[in-house]
Amino acid sequence: MIVREYEKDEITVHKVPLMLMGGIVAISVVLTASVTMGFLPKQSVPSEARAAAGITATQERTLRFFDEPDGTVRIEDGASAEVLARFGEGEGGFIRATVRSLVHQRRIRGLGPEVPFTLTAWQNGNLTLADPATGRAVEVSAFGPANRAVYADLLPRKEGAR
């Protein structure tokens, strides 16, 4: 059997990384305590932040979403019933997920599809899909540019745009 003896100073840890890690832990504790005690806001409410910044809507469109028997999701303009898009099975995953979350809230409250959803484009380039029936909204732009583009394509074309 081989027995190996270690000297006291053989294994060393530098103090600088330990101090930096301790600093990160201390900052995390201070920030958490600040939010808990009310010194910092717990969350940002997009509608309040837009109102405070004076950001207004640039475009708006009402939308209705339909599940067809073959699994396709059909999206229509809420006012004219013009078909804006169709997503077959395996397509439009982001639209399916966001709309299902809003429809789920309607079902909980016993509401039906009578009131169309509202898609709003804001001056700062963000998009919001809102449900006027429940007051719930999804900040579409928070999910990245590719997902934002899917909803941006549902807005009316601006004058002079292709």
Image (cartoon, grey):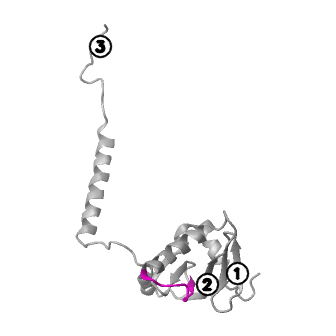
Q: Which residues are magenta?
A: 109-121
Q: For the residue carrying disc 2, how many other residues have a C-alpha within 10 Å: few (<14), some (14-19), or many (20+)?
A: many
Residue type at mark 1: give it.
Leu
Residue type at mark 3: give it.
Arg
Query: x, y percentage for residue 125?
Result: 58, 78
Establish if 55 lies above or below 30: below
| Residue 84: assigned label | 1
Q: For the residue carrying disc 3, how many other residues have a C-alpha within 10 Å: few (<14), some (14-19), or many (20+)?
A: few
* 1 and 2 marks in contact (CB < 8 Å): yes
Residue nearest the observer in this picture, 131 or 15 = 131
What residue did someone put label 2 on?
63
What residue do we see at 43% from left, 78% from top? Answer: 108
Inter-mark Cα distance, 3 to 2: 74 Å
What residue do we see at 61% from left, 79% from top? Answer: 65
Query: x, y percentage for residue 109?
Result: 42, 82
Query: x, y percentage for residue 120?
Result: 56, 84
Instruction: Determine the secondary structure under disc 3.
Output: loop
What residue do we see at 54% from left, 67% from top? Answer: 143
The C terminus, quarter of image = bottom right
Whichever of callouts 1 and 3 sits on the residue coming sooner in the sequence is 3
Residue type at mark 2: give it.
Leu
Q: Magenta span has 63? A: no
Which dot, 1 or 3, sits closer to the camera?
Answer: 1
Residue 133 appears in view: yes
Residue nearest the observer in this picture, 8 or 80 = 80
Inter-mark Cα distance, 1 to 2: 9 Å
What residue did someone put label 3 on?
4
